[in-house]
Amino acid sequence: MLYSSQVPIEQSALLVIDAQDSFKATPRWERRNNRDFEKNVGALIDAYRAAGLPVIFFLHNDDDQYFEVGSPYVKLMDFIERRPDEPLIYKDTRNAFTSTGLGALLLKNNVRRIVVTGIQMEQCCETTTRVAADLGYAVDFVTEATMTFPIPNYDVPGEELGVQEIQCRTEYALRRRFATIATVAQLQDQLRARSAVPA
């Protein structure tokens, strides 16, 4: 595994995965965790822009009515104002690599380290992290800039996995195997330190 400490922050890109209105349209939206999601993702977008480093957005499509191609809900959430030079990539797989040209885009920008944010924590965000690590990228997984919902057990009616259990399992599975579990403040500090170094 390539650790984030081995790759300088200036060789990184911020991925904002599936921060889209599709989730807000579903009944489970009220049961989401991390009510600071928008604030934390926004802070990282601002920090990456200030550092002049890539910010890449993703929208997910599948056969769910809220995610299908052409749905009015398949758009970035209102707290995000994407700039014209920031890529917006549509995907139809759980990870952000397989159904997109992300790998070529990262190569073009000399990116060897990615910072993962978005929705859902244990699905598209975690799957992207695992694939990225296997492809040789260093990965920062920013749990406080991800979001999830309770997961029902479809084999046992009424049983579900709560959001705290999901977060704990996700961090345990990823930490030092696929990613560094990073905070917004840690990444902001690294980006500020980079900006303070004379060119």
Image (spheres, helix red, strand yellow):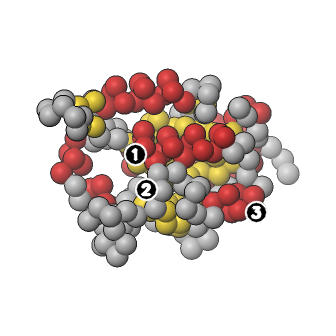
Q: Amino acid at mark 2?
A: Asp
Q: Residue furthest bottom?
A: 70
Mark 2 Cα shell of 10 Å, populated few (<14), some (14-19), many (≥20) = many
Q: Which mark is residue 108?
A: 3
Is residue 54 something that shows in the picture? yes
Q: Residue at x 49, y 62 (%)?
A: 91
The part of the image, by quadrant, that contains residue 56 is bottom right
Q: Amino acid at mark 3?
A: Lys
Residue 55 visible within the image: no
| Contact, mark 1 vs mark 2 (Cβ under 8 Å) | yes
Residue 16 position within the rendered picture, expressed as x and y whole percent measured from the top left = 50, 53
Q: Residue at x 18, y 31 (%)?
A: 156
> Does residue 140 lie above or below 92 as drawn?
above
Q: Nearer the viewer, residue 104 or 29?
A: 104
* Comes first in the chain, label 1 or label 3: 3
In the displayed structure, 88 sits above or below 107; it is below
Report the Cα–Cα distance between label 3 and label 2. Answer: 23 Å
Residue tagged by mark 2?
A: 18
Res 147 label: none
- For this orientation, the residue located farthest to the front is 155
Q: Circle 1 sits on which residue?
A: 120
Element at label 2: loop
Question: Which mark is first along the chain, 2 or 3?
Answer: 2
In the visual, does 178 lie left or right of 27? right
Instruction: Name the amino acid type tagged 1.
Output: Gln
Say which element carries label 1.
loop
